[in-house]
Every structure is written in C-alpha cells, then in structure tokens.
Image: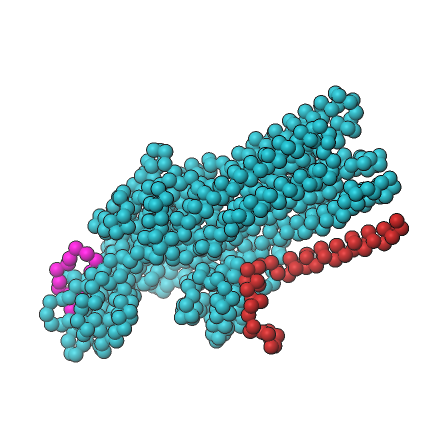
Chain colours: A cyan, B red
C-alpha cells in the first residue's frame, strides 16, 4: 500500500516540487515517515528512537517532537507497516505517511526566507538603535551627521532585503487597484527613509532610520508567526493526506493483477480488490463473496453482504474476501466524486467570511493615508515649507504604523492554535478560530465521530467458558470487525482459545472449523441456521444445540460523552444526525443526553439540515468524518473532522482532531472565544495608542524618540496580551 | 571622539558575526524541531560517549 518505501518515488516528486532544485539533506534522505500523535516528552522520544533503532534494517530514526513525526532511514526492504506494530507494542499510536506527498513541505522555503529577513532586520535595527540612542542622548553637529550617515548606510540595504515581502504584496495590490495593509506600510517605510535621507543631507536634527527598521522588524515578526502557525497546520494536514495512496489492481488480459493509478482506470476494467482494500471506483461484483464496510459513505455500522452481481461504490471497504469488480463509473462519474461536487457548491459560501483583521485593515488603510495627506496639506498651507510638511506627514505615517495591528492577530492565533495543537487539534483555516467563537449549535455525526465505528461485544461474559474459548478460536481466523471485537473481549477476559482444526474462513459468511470431531461455525444467522434478531449479531454454532447469539454495539469514542456534556453545559444546542438506522441513533442520543436527532439521513439531508439551521440564524459547528458528511461539513459555519476521517472530509473541514479523544472540542470553543476577545482587545489597544500618538504627530511633536517608544510599547503590549492565552 | 572610528566598525563586525551565525543555524535545520531539542537535553543517553 505504501509508495513511501520506494526510494525512487520518495525522492523524485520532492525534487520536482522543491523550489530552485534545492533539496535539504537531512529530511529527504529518510525514506519512511511515521506520524506519532501521542508523543509528548523526552521519555517518549527515547523510547520511540530506541525501539525503532532496534528493528533490523533501520539505520537511523529521529523523532521530531514539534511535528510529532518520526523520520526513519532504513534498508529498502523495511516497510512502514512493519514498524507500526513495533511502536504500538511500546504504547504509541503510529500511522504510516506517504513521504512523496510530504516532501513539498519538508523544506519550508518561505518560512526560512522570512526568518532570514527577520534576522537581518533585527541586526540592522539593533545597530541603528545604538547610534540613534547616542543622537537622542546628545550627540550633535558633525558626530550626529556621521551617525546618521552610518545609520543610512546600514538601513538602506537592510530594508531593501528585509522589506521585500511588503514591497511585493503592496505592488500586487496596487496593480489591480486595491488597497491592503501593506500599502500604508510600504509608504510609511519609503517616506521615512526618503525624508530621513533628505534631513541627513541637510544636517537636520531628526532621522527616522531606526523607526523604519523596527517597523519592518515587528511586522516581519507578525508575518513569521502567522506563517509558522499555518505551516504547522498545513504540514500536518498534508501528513493526513499522505495516509492514502490512490492505486488499484487492474486485471490484464491474462487475468494477472497489475498496479495502476486510479486515474488510469476506465469503464469495464476488471479490478481486483483485496480484503482490507477500498473500492477505487463504482462497479459490479464479477467474482467472489465478501462483506463491505459502508460506514464512511453512509454511516451504517453493519457490514453489508456482497456477492456476484451486487453493485459497489467507490470508497467502500472490502472486509473478508477478495472481489473482482467491473468498473461502471470512474473518476468524476463515481458516487464519491458526486459527493465531492456537493462540497464544492457548499464551499463557495464559506469564503465570504472576512476576518477581523481584514475588516480592520479596510478601515485602517484609507484612514491613515487621508490623515497623513491632511497633515501634509495643513502644514504646507500653514508654513509653505515643503520640508516641514513632508517631515510631519512621514511622522504621522510612521506613528500610525500598523505594527500593533500586524502583530495583534498573528500573535493571538499563534498562541491559541499552539495551545489547541498540544491538545491534539489542528487549525487548518486562517479564520477558523474566529468562526468557531461564534458557534451556538453543534451537529454531530454518529459512526466514526461519536462512536469508534468499531463494534464491541456486549454479551460475551454471558457465554459459558467453553463457548467463550470456542468463539475466540473461531474469531481468530478472521479479520471481520465482529471477529476482531470478539478477540478483544476474549483478550480482556484473559481467556485461552480452544484448540480447533481445519479452520477456514468462508468469505461473506463467517469462519468454520472442526472441534472435537464436530463442525463448529461462527458467522451470520442464515449460515448457521439461526433466526436473525434485531441487533447486530454473530451466531456461534457449537455443533450441538441451538446456535448462540453474540450481540454487538458500537463503542463510544473516548471523550465523546464529556464533549457533549461540556457543550450542553456551555448552552449550545447539540444535534445528532446520522445515516445509521433509527434504533442505534436513538439509543446513542439518549445515552448522551442529546434531544434533537435525525436517523437514516442521506448526505443531502445532512447538508439541508445544516443549511436550515444556518438560515434560522444559528452558527453551526459540524463534526463528522464520513463522505456522507462532507457536504454538511462544507455547508456549516465551521467544521471539525477526526484524523481517521476520509480525505475528502478532512479537506472540507477547518479543524482536524488528531487524537482519538473528542473532549478537546468543547475546549476549542472556549479557546476560540478567548482568542477572539484578545484580538478585539488588541485592536482596542492599538486604537487607544493611535488616539494618543496621532495628535502628537499631527502637531509636529513626534520626535524619532517618541515614535520609537510608542511603537515598541504598543507592539510589546499586544504580544504580551496574546501570550495570556497560553 | 576618535575612539568611535574603532568602536563603530567593531560593533558592526560583532553584530555581523552574530547575524552570520544565526543564518548558519537556519541553514543547517536547527529550528526544525524546537520542542524536541528542548526536551532532548534531558536525555542522558549520549552523556558518556558521543553519538556514533
């Protein structure tokens, strides 16, 4: 299943994707990557590294705790699938990653670029600040002029290099006739530099070189924080995408399976789907019998029986036996893609949300330009001195510099998403936190979201000991979810399996064997000759007497009950909308105390219900994992999906839940509310500071010292305010 | 004030050394895993002999 183990594949797309052909040494040499969502401390790092290094064939393993990821260099025959169980034995959840999909983010060129510029701006501003302090504390005449000239010599190249991101953004905005935050920034920097140079050449008293540099430094710091947060989210999101490899086994004319990309499949191809594999296309079963897990598509927990002639849809998982299918719909025609189209329609509604920062910038940018223009005009008319008027206009632009604004949002979102990341939540979308803060209604999906989608055996304890041992022995022969559940129950009870012979799995029916000379079976009702009951059940035929029924129910995901309770306590409206049968949904809703629930909902129904709630004025948070949820996820105001969800669902959602635990959802809402409050506070701080500083500037009282003090104070205040979130 | 002719270039040079040092750490991937590096210091695994 993994293409990551193929060295040539891991290297090539990375080389192609890497900018300027530069390839970083350390990461791309590693040929395997594992995601480790549960590591958090030094002991974990040592255990994982030691455990991996002990595996034969592993040359080196290094854990990256920031990304919660292990990079492994190993011999070509070592597969990631072999390493996962090793880590699971050590007590760590591990997932294989497709390095080919990851390598694009391995070298974070943009982040490194910003960091370099940040360093240059810092270096230059510190040096210029030293010279400026000498000037402010009394250097005069020739010394002052010399200091100013040295400052200029440092400042110009530094700004030319460090300010490039702003110049580029401002130019792009101006070219299409728009104003963005970068236009006033660039104008302030350029005007400050030009007037300072002019003043210096006339041996004037005031130069704003330090202000121009610190402005660049603070703004770059904001940019870098912003970038860092999103890079972490993006790389983790790609990490999730790297878990799926779109390949299929096509049967050639001789009936031999050949591995091909899913995109190359055409209608009427014969495709082999092995047990555990996912249907690549819609089709009809030609050969074989098996059971299909449809839970990701429809939310049904029970496996569906499939035999020759049954139709299958892309995305379903083949459980027990190999199937040969004939493709009836591929690519855009398949049911999977039609669902994805629903998402595209709903997505277009999402992008209409403007962030608080954008709304502030829209007011801010024209405001300061008008203000500084008026100051220039006023002073020119008052003094008829171009030099004074220009100096004052520059001072106004510098002092209203949006460095507090530029830092306010990134600092808060970085602190908030860092805190949520530690709890196992990944903020994918830039405005997700702001939207999450407004939520008043939460809609949950059932299977795979509130529940594990894994059945649990309810009445295993009620069997006699010999029956338990027999059931355990039969269940060991199969990978069917119900069998796995029996094995788990038996292992918990500490039971040994009975000794059976001639064990065989009959795909689609169950497992049978000889026990004490008698044929024993574990499987579906009709096969063992029992009456099928209401609930999900497997039947044990002991060779004598009536078959014994074993019933199953879906187990709750850890933290699900806590999350629902916390959300209800916070006064939010909680809904449960599932594609599963009414009994199961009703049962779960009463267990969790959810009053509003809808069962047997089709994907369109879910989407409609979410839209209906939105139209009633509610802000809806949708939590879901399946393909049947994707449209609803996209239609909701904000959406969360667990990492175990299908790729399409994760793409459609704003926040991804990395671990198994659901309880961080309620906390995420509170953190989001706090974060939005901090952002607003920061805006208020920035405004307050402008209210004080701007009249000073317009009155011509803003010396470079005052500008430097005011600018630094406001930036530090908003950063400290943001840190209160941690 | 003639001392300034030495001190200013020296201060710029020292600052420049710091800047070059920082750029070197950026280029050699030393900021890839800040959290892990902060914890690794607690490990005594390679205390007695360097990592091979």
Give the residue at x 71% y 38%.
A706
Q: Depth check: A265 or A470 in front?
A: A470
Q: Residue furthest left?
A: A545
Q: Depth check: A445 or A375 in front?
A: A375
Q: Position of residue A400 (x, y in %)?
A: 65, 34
Examine the rendered structure and indicate whether residue A465 appears above or below residue A272: below
Tell me if A341 is positioned left or right of A519 in this view. right
Examine the rendered structure and indicate whether residue A304 appears above or below residue A56: above
Q: Residue furthest top?
A: A381
One can see residue A149 in this view: no
Give the residue at x 16% y 79%.
A516
Tell me if A201 is positioned left or right of A336 in this view. right
Q: Depth check: A668 or A721 in front?
A: A721
Tell me if A355 is positioned left or right of A662 in this view. right
- The magenta segment is A527-541
Quarter of the image where the N terminus of chain A is located: bottom left
Q: Position of residue A664 (x, y in %)?
A: 41, 52
Q: Position of residue A162 (x, y in %)?
A: 68, 46
Give the residue at x 21% y 66%.
A460
Q: Quadrant of residue A407?
A: top right
Q: Position of residue A475 (x, y in %)?
A: 25, 69
**Residue A708 painted magenta:** no
Give the residue at x 55% y 46%.
A722
């Amino acid at each position: 299943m993994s293409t990551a183990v193929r060295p040539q594949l891991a290297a090539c797309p990375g080389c192609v994707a890497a900018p300027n052909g530069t390839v970083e040494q350390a990461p791309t040499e590693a040929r395997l990557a594992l995601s480790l969502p549960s590591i958090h401390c030094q002991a974990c790092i040592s255990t994982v590294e030691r455990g991996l290094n002990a595996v034969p064939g592993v040359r080196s393993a290094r854990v990256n705790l920031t990304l919660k990821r292990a990079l492994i260099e190993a011999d070509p025959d070592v597969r990631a699938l072999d390493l996962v169980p090793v880590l699971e034995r050590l007590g760590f959840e591990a997932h294989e990653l497709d390095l080919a999909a990851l390598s694009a983010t391995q070298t974070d060129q943009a982040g490194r670029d910003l960091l370099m510029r940040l360093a240059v701006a810092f270096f230059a501003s510190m040096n210029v600040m030293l010279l400026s302090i000498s000037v402010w504390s009394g250097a005069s005449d020739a010394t002052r002029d010399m200091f100013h000239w040295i400052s200029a010599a440092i400042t110009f190249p530094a700004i030319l290099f460090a300010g490039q991101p702003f110049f580029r953004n401002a130019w792009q905005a101006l070219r299409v006739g728009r104003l963005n935050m970068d236009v006033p920034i660039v104008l302030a920097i350029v005007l400050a530099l030009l007037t300072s140079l002019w003043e210096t050449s006339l041996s004037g008293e005031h130069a704003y070189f330090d202000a121009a540099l610190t402005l660049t430094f603070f703004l770059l710091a904001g940019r870098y924080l912003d970038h860092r947060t999103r890079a972490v989210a993006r790389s983790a999101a790609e990490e999730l995408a790297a878990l799926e490899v779109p390949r299929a086994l096509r049967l050639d004319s001789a009936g031999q399976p050949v591995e091909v990309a899913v995109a190359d499949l055409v209608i009427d191809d014969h495709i082999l789907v092995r047990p555990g594999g996912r249907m690549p296309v819609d089709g009809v079963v030609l050969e074989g019998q098996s059971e299909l897990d449809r839970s990701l598509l429809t939310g049904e927990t029970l496996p569906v029986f499939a035999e020759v002639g049954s139709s299958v849809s892309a995305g379903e998982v083949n459980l027990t036996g190999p199937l040969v299918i004939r493709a009836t719909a591929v690519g855009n025609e398949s049911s999977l893609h039609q669902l994805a189209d629903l998402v595209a329609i709903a997505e277009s509604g999402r992008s209409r949300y403007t962030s608080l920062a954008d709304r502030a910038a829209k007011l801010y940018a024209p405001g300061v330009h008008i203000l500084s223009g008026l100051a220039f005009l006023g002073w020119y008319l008052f003094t008829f001195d171009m030099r004074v008027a220009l100096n004052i206009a520059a001072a106004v632009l510098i002092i209203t510099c949006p460095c507090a604004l530029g830092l306010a949002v990134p600092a808060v979102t970085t602190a908030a998403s860092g805190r949520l990341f530690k709890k196992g939540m990944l903020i994918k979308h830039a405005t997700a936190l702001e939207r999450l803060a407004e939520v008043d209604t939460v809609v949950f999906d059932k299977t795979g979201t509130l529940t594990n989608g894994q059945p649990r055996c309810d009445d295993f304890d009620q069997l006699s000991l010999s029956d338990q041992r027999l059931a355990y022995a039969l269940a060991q022969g199969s990978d069917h979810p119900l069998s796995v559940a029996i094995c788990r129950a038996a292992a918990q009870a500490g039971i040994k399996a009975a000794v059976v012979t001639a064990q065989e799995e009959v795909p689609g029916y169950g497992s049978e064997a000889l026990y004490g000379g008698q044929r024993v079976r574990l499987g579906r009702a009709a096969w063992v000759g029992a009456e099928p009951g209401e609930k999900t059940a497997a039947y044990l035929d002991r060779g004598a007497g009536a078959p014994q029924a074993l019933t199953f129910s879906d187990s709750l995901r850890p933290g699900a009950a806590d999350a629902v309770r916390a959300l209800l306590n916070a006064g939010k409206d909680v809904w449960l909308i599932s594609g599963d049968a009414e009994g199961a949904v009703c049962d779960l809703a009463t267990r969790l105390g959810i009053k509003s629930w809808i069962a047997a909902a089709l994907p369109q129904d879910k989407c409609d219900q979410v839209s209906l709630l939105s139209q009633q004025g509610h802000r809806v948070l949708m939590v879901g994992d399946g393909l049947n949820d994707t449209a609803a996820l996209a239609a909701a105001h904000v959406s969360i999906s667990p990492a175990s969800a299908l790729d399409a669902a994760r793409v459609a959602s704003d926040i991804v839940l990395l671990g198994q635990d659901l309880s961080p959802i309620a906390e995420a809402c509170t953190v989001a509310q706090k974060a939005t409050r901090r952002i607003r506070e920061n805006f208020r701080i920035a405004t307050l500071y402008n209210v004080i500083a701007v009249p000073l500037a317009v009155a011509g009282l803003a010396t470079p010292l005052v500008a430097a003090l005011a600018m630094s104070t406001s930036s530090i205040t908003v950063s400290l305010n943001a840190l209160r979130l941690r | 004030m003639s001392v300034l002719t030495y001190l200013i270039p020296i201060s710029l040079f020292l600052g420049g050394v710091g800047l070059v040092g920082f750029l070197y750490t950026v280029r050699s991937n030393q900021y890839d895993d800040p959290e892990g590096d902060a914890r690794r210091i607690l490990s005594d695994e390679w205390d007695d002999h360097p990592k091979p």
